[in-house]
Amino acid sequence: MNALELARWQFGITTIYHFVLVPLTIGLTPLVAIMQTVWYRTGNETWLRLTKFFGKLLLINFALGVATGIVQEFQFGMAWSEYSRFVGDVFGAPLAMEALAAFFIESTFLGLWIFGWERLPKKIHLATIWLVAIGANLSAYFILAANSWMQHPVGTTYNAQTGRAEMTDIGAVLSNPTLLSAFPHTIATSFLVAGTFVAGIAGWWMVRAVRAKNESLARSLYRPAVLLGVVVMLVAGIGVTLSGDTQAKLMFQQQPMKMAAAEALCVSEDGASFSILAIGNLANDCAGVRHVISVPGLTSFLANGDFSSHLDGMTEIQQRDEQRFGEGVDYSPNLAVTYWSFRLMIGLGAGSAALALLALWLTRKGRVTGNKWFARLALGAIPTPFLAASFGWLFTEMGRQPWVVAPNPTGIDEIRLLTARGVSTSVSAGTILTSMIVFTVLYAALGVVWFRLIARYAREGAPELTDTPPADESETGPLSFAY
Amino acid sequence: MELTTVWFVLIAILWTGYLVLEGFDFGVGMLIPIIGRDDAERRVVINTIGPVWDGNEVWLLTAGGATFAAFPEWYATLFSGFYLPLLLILVALIVRAVAFEYRGKINSPAWRARWDAGIGLGSWLPSILWGVAFANIVRGVAINADHQYTGGFWALLNLYALLGGLTTLLLFLTHGAVFLALKTDGTVRARAGALAAKLSIATLVVAGGFAVWTQVAYSVTWTWAVVAVAALALLGVVVATSRRREGWAFALSALAILAAVVLIFGSLYPDVMPSTTDPAFSLTVTNASSTHYTLTVMTWVAVVLTPVVLAYQAWTYWVFRKRISTADIPAHTGLTFERSRERA
């Protein structure tokens, strides 16, 4: 493999890994804040126990998410220096804003939340976790502003003298239509991830408590957590669907090649059908695509709200791009990856809805359940929205290829960059291979520890409360929390 | 002042914030086994920075992001050129961050010892490597007409840069020991104070040597004043630590790190990365910078947000101002990996 391929693999591995952890942080922090708020408002200690239980799981996740986030900011310069030179004037701004406006809040107030249980008045301590939640969500906004610009560059002009993209309108960059649909989609996904996480673990515990003849614990402690998780899942699920629909419609306009590949739509059609199953050939090209199961007209409807509308196929888009951007380049993404990641994203995302509906039924009117199949389903559902999110990003990024900065169909043609042109020219393949191996091995080892810790703490259940909580703002006595 | 110069100064400020704050975090991390002789003492040492280390580290992310936004050429040349040292720093910071959070999660001495080793590695490596990196930037590296670094990894390990690495290492060790003396009580405080007194002398000698070498070989006249401030501050640390004036020692040690950053950036200006291949190929505040528009936007962002950040970070230090000792350390709350009894 050459430096370009290795740098792409490295970016893919480190980014997907990072974004397994991040959605849980984005979604779970507000849920823990809600739990703590309920305890603060009602004094009901159930919610304090749940706050501490899920708070601990959050911290285990948070640490690894933060640690792997540093790599993200550095590797643009390290492995993608030519990309950085081309886009830095625009792309660096949201990254710097993220650090200054969001990440500082998140990290500083997390420290206050962890160590402040008895050092801070209850109300201020509650405010710290909300600030962490706001910081985490704000972070996502700026990072998605940067990514959305790569999908659909706006607010930028081309400087022919330097050959660089130059920002002309920060407002346009921060209100990019791509961003305005990607942000709610990502946040809703994160809440789906966190809701499933909470409902899954609490659901498993509810069954376990019932089977251990401790129905009152199941009813008083775990059932409320299951309901919170399920409600979040349902609301988030609707949000994911609606924002995803908006995003897809937008993407048909902005990156028609990506969407054509997602549907394996090789030639232009009126009333294009939605492919449920298609089979390709080993060459992974249009010539081998055979649609096995399809829903007539549905893709046209999803793209334009009209079952018979016209959609361009990959062949026509390729011809158009050749005229516009030059011949000799294949402007289509990897067909199989784009097609399947799109389907897996949708399918897996819908998977956790099954759990939500079943849980609602089993807990109706104050009921609890001791059904062991429900316990298995509850645990089994936890990974599905994580996987859906990963496939979603795989689709977004792989579907944009061969571009790293995809040209804006209604923008300036010069604002575009092939991925192959973005890689660092001064870094050898051997060096990138070294770092890729180092990151992969390190991340794998830490991933095993992360999983074992989360599993261990989840299996322990919500902690008992210790005695009477000390008075607010105590200046003496042991810390309630210490490393 | 030109906006490019403003941003050069702002980046220096961000690095100062990072090195002053994470400087003592690194020092504390390195000193865990040296100052903490038993488990309770080690926990005292770690918990002095427990609530703040994560916020301190964001200064690095901000410095990196600001360099990307304000000087994309600098960011691109530097990060791709110093690829392997940065890889080592990243590995160190990842292991360290996770180690802080995970060490107490499982109640086993072997588990804690492993993560403490991780904090150690994660503190020693960057303490040396930041010095090596900055010394190389000041000294100049091989950069061609396309602004690409052509020197390779081993060229970065020259004598001057290694002395730079030793300088940051000693600065941070002293800074950490002084911080521990200021934030703890009991045996830990006494031990940290005594160690700080010894370390500060070594730091004065080595850092003084590095400062003079920098001044004579690479700098401009006015930074002699900065060298003098650094030397006086470090001398002050020696005096203050020997008299156990902990507050003064910490303030002066922070001043010494500030002076080091000013010396480095003062020597560089108007270059940001001088080329040893041909001075014409050097990266400067002008040829490496973003456009006037981007710098204007970023100036507003920085001017509005930096004071806010400083305010709430300062408040954090106020909240956790109390000294801690082994009496403050609670029993271990970590679980064990063995299956617990069924509690439900």
Image (spheres, rainbow, N blue to C red):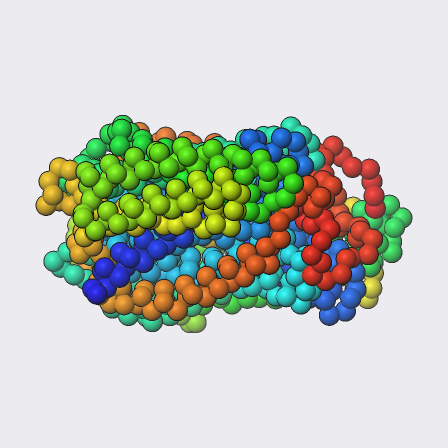
Q: In front here: A100 or B306? A: B306
Instruction: Give the residue at x 87% y 54%.
Output: A215
Quarter holding the C terminus of chain A is top right
Residue B335 drawn above or below residue A479: above
Quarter holding the N terminus of chain A is top left
- The answer to whether one can see residue B217 in this image is yes
Instruction: Give the residue at x 74% y 59%.
Output: A48
Q: In front here: A24 or B18? A: B18
Instruction: Give the residue at x 71% y 44%.
Output: B327
Residue A301: % across, % down: 44, 68
- The answer to whether one can see residue B60 in this image is no
Residue B304: % across, % down: 39, 69
Q: In front here: B318 or A149? A: B318
Count of residue discs: 0
Question: Quadrant of the rendered structure where residue A174 is?
Answer: bottom left
Q: In front here: A460 or A341? A: A460
Q: B177 left or right of A458?
A: left
Residue B17: % across, % down: 40, 53
Instruction: Give the residue at x 49% y 41%.
Output: B241
Question: Quadrant of the rendered structure where residue B80 is?
Answer: top left
Residue B282: % across, % down: 16, 45
Q: A304 left or right of A236?
A: left
Outermost residue to the right: A213
